[in-house]
Image (cartoon, rainbow, N blue to C red):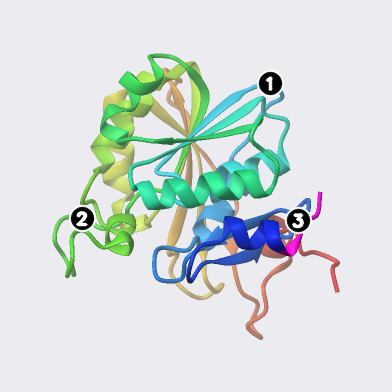
């Protein structure tokens, strides 16, 4: 359903903009002065396998990009986004409203460290997360800045995310995360310690001759030890254009 100019103006606040998601006509509200979603969130939405009728929780949902994309791409029953920053959670809720997805997507304001108390144990089939990548105080200027909170482990750590995910997932429930390869050994060891067995991994390379700068990971709660390595995902061709694999994930393949 197309929004009128007045309806759109009512949903948007100062400095916010609407960005096209290239799928089902969905758009998302973002504020350039806060944290806008990047390629990592889009790639995670393409990597996650969602089955018909499943319940999905996105931890640290930000603007709600992952629940909205997963709703568009799958037959999941219901999608929930948990976000600690009230301003981001409000923006995500308004994007859900803009796309008329109130019956499919819920946005909850709350702390990842308290997620199992908020939702209850063994309450979701799938968890997705695009957590802060950076450790500690390195490069921090303002611990309360929205972009800092999204990029650095200021309000939540990798341990917090994994411990809560293990509690919230149903037995054999699936965990999907995008992160940085330099923390891969730590990620795997902590997943196993929490009872989430790494089952599938894909490295993302900006160019074919460059080092990977992202890693996509799938884990099963209580799964057996066996890891499948997917073929590398290359982002750019030699001429700087997106590869067909990236265009397909973005939903732009064969578009003018």
Can residue 180 be seen at all in this image of the molecule? yes
Q: Quadrant of residue 96?
A: top right
List x then y, in percent, for residue 139: 18, 70
* Tally of numbered discs: 3
Q: CA distance from mark 3 to mark 2?
A: 42 Å
Q: In the figure, 206 relative to 228: above or below? A: below
Residue range in magenta is 1-5
Outermost residue toward the left in this view: 137
The crowd level at tag 2 (other Cα within 10 Å; few <14, some 14-19, many 20+) is some
Q: Which residue is mark 3?
A: 3
Residue situated in front as seen by the camera: 152 or 33:
33
List x then y, in percent, for residue 178: 45, 49
List x then y, in percent, for residue 243: 69, 69
Residue 152 counted in the magenta span: no
Residue situated in front as seen by the camera: 99 or 149:
99
Q: Quadrant of residue 192?
A: top left
- First in sequence: mark 1 or mark 3? 3
Q: In the figure, 130 relative to 193: above or below? A: below
Instruction: Give the residue at x 50% y 57%.
Output: 40
Q: Main secondary structure of the magenta part?
A: loop
Q: Quadrant of residue 122?
A: top left
Direction from residue 187 to residue 232 in the image, left or right: right
Can residue 21 be seen at all in this image of the molecule? no
Q: Which residue is mark 2?
A: 135
Instruction: Give the residue at x 71% y 53%.
Output: 26
Q: Which residue is mark 1?
A: 53
Front tag of 1 and 3: 3
């Amino acid at each position: 359903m197309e929004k009128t100019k007045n309806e759109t103006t009512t949903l948007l606040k100062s400095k916010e903009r609407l960005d096209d998601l290239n799928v089902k006509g969905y758009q998302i509200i973002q504020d350039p002065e806060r944290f806008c979603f990047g390629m990592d969130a889009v790639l995670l939405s393409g990597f996650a396998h969602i089955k018909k009728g499943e319940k999905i929780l996105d931890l640290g949902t930000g603007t709600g990009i992952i629940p909205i994309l997963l709703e568009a791409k799958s037959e999941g029953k219901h999608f929930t986004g948990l976000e600690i920053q009230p301003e981001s959670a409000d923006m995500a809720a308004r994007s859900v409203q803009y796309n008329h997805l109130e019956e499919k997507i819920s946005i909850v304001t709350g702390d990842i460290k308290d997620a199992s108390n908020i939702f209850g144990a063994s309450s979701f089939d799938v968890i997705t997360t695009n957590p802060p990548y950076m450790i500690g105080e390195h490069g921090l200027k303002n611990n309360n800045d929205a972009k800092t909170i999204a990029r650095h482990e200021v309000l939540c750590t990798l341990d917090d995310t994994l411990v809560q995910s293990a509690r919230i997932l149903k037995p054999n429930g699936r965990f999907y995360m995008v992160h940085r390869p330099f923390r891969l050994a730590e990620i795997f060891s902590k997943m196993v310690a929490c009872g989430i067995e790494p089952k599938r991994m894909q490295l993302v390379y900006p160019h074919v001759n460059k080092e990977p700068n992202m890693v996509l990971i799938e884990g099963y709660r209580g799964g057996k030890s066996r890891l499948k390595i997917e073929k590398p995902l290359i982002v750019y061709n030699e001429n700087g254009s997106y590869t067909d694999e990236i265009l397909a994930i973005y939903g732009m393949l064969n578009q003018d």
